[in-house]
Amino acid sequence: QTKGAGWGYVPTAPSDSWVTAWGAAALLAARDAGVDVPKLSFSYILQWFDGATDKKDYHLGYAPGQMGRVNLAGGEAFLHHDTLSAFGGLMRLQIEGRPGATVAAAERTVSTDLPNPDPARRDFCHWYFGTTLLAQRDQRKGTAWTAWTQAVVRESLTLQQTADTCALGSWLPDDRWSLMGGKVYATLMNALTMEQVLGLAPARAPRSK
């Protein structure tokens, strides 16, 4: 972890919000398992998020100098979703122990960008982090949770492979990030999303620092 910030893709690389959010998730899981994680590490994460957050609409950018769309080579035809704000908002919710302005903004963004049948809008990461944010922010209750889960279940299960072959139960790698992750990524992200919808993963309430 970089002092005063988070993580990049390799040691000594500049921090970015995507890898930093994954680092935050790992430290939170360690903390929940009873590991003594220094509070300073979480403070650095929040310091990075603060610097990469737009002060007008509170969306989280990839980095302070890269606040717009993030492209994956070969996937430019897919439309953009504010997945980073959902992921970052989820991490803030757990680190800070309360839903602040950035969490509220992330929830509004997710609630107005529901999964739909358009192949160009297909983003399994967005589906997962949107579901998990709403599960923990709203404790699987309310109109936002209902509207989102109805949409994500409809779209996800429509894409699940049902033919009696070796692909039964999997998902095809045909979303915004599948060029990098492949069928294993596609299947696991959708399975994790359904786990949240069904309540098989706990919707833990925010806790104080």
Image (spheres, rainbow, N blue to C red):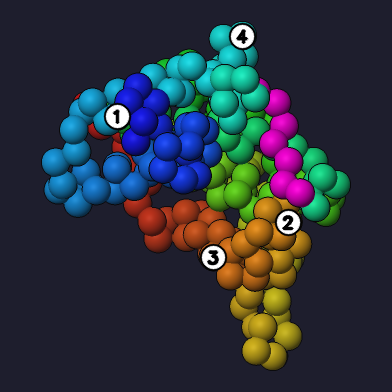
Q: Which residue is mark 3?
A: 188
Q: Which residue is mark 1?
A: 42
Q: Which residue is mark 2?
A: 175
Q: CA distance from mark 3 to mark 2?
A: 13 Å
Res 2 quadrant in image: top left
Amino acid type shown at disc 2: Asp
Q: Residue at x 50, y 44 (%)?
A: 9
Q: Residue at x 64, y 28 (%)?
A: 109
Measured as percent of width and height from the top left, residue 168 is found at: 65, 83
Task: Choose between 113 and 83: the one closer to the eye.
Answer: 83
Q: CA distance from mark 1 to mark 2?
A: 32 Å
Measured as percent of width and height from the top left, residue 102 is found at: 50, 20
Amino acid type shown at disc 1: Phe
4 vs 1, front mark? 1
Magenta stretch?
67-73
**Callout 4: 10 Å neighbours few (<14), some, many (20+)?**
few
SS at circle 1? helix
1 vs 3, front mark? 1
Residue 109 seen anywhere in this rendered image of the structure:
yes
Residue 59 seen anywhere in this rendered image of the structure:
no
**Callout 2: 10 Å neighbours few (<14), some, many (20+)?**
some
Which of marks 4 and 3 precedes in the sequence? 4
Q: Residue at x 23, y 26 (%)?
A: 40
Res 206 quadrant in image: top left
Q: Does 135 sit above or below residue 206?
A: below
Q: Which residue is mark 4?
A: 56
Amino acid type shown at disc 4: Lys
